[in-house]
Amino acid sequence: MKLAVVQFSIIFFLLTSSFCIFSTADSPCGEKCNVRCSKASRQKYCLRFCNICCEECNYCVPSGTFGNTDECPCYRDLKNSKGGQKCP
């Protein structure tokens, strides 16, 4: 029974993850995160977390592709589960 639940969960995740949109120009965060992540080596990872941070911080994303985090203290102060910086 446990194995069936795990298998279902994995299949469900794989099917639904293909429908996730990491960034779109239509969203308030899309254009800002596209600029922020334009030079990132891991685009999807950067866009995913940038959009999460942007929404949590009322659509505030620092300008440029790196640094400038003082422009958005909320964005700067969000931490991941290990205590590191969450937002790119």
Image (tube, rainbow, N blue to C red):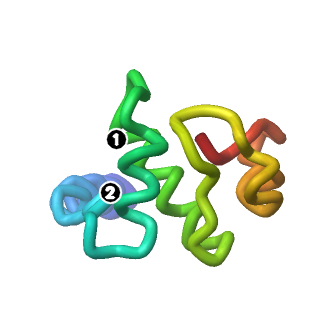
Q: Who is closer to the viewer here, 9 or 75?
A: 75
| Mark found first going from the N terminus, 2 or 1 | 2
Picture disc at residue 44? 1
The quadrant in which residue 16 appears is: bottom left
Q: CA distance from mark 2 to mark 1?
A: 7 Å
Q: Position of residue 10 (x, y in %)?
A: 28, 53
**Of the pair 43 and 72, the residue shown nearer to us:** 72
Determine the secondary structure under disc 2: loop
Residue at 32% x, 57% y is 22
Residue 4 shows in this picture: no
Quarter of the image containing the N terminus? bottom left
Q: Amino acid at mark 1?
A: Lys
At 58% from the left and 48% from the top, the residue drawn is 63
2 and 1 marks in contact (CB < 8 Å): yes
Q: Position of residue 34 (x, y in %)?
A: 36, 49
Left or right of 29 on screen, residue 26: left
Say which residue label 2 marks: 22
Q: Which residue is nearer to you in this view: 77 or 11? A: 77
Label 1 crowd bin: few (<14), some (14–19), many (20+), radius 10 Å: some
Task: Where is residue 29? Give x, y as percent.
Answer: 44, 66
Tell me if 4 is positioned left or right of 63 in this view. left
- Residue type, numbered disc 2: Phe
Q: Position of residue 39 (x, y in %)?
A: 40, 27
Q: Pick the quarter of the image with the C terminus.
A: top right
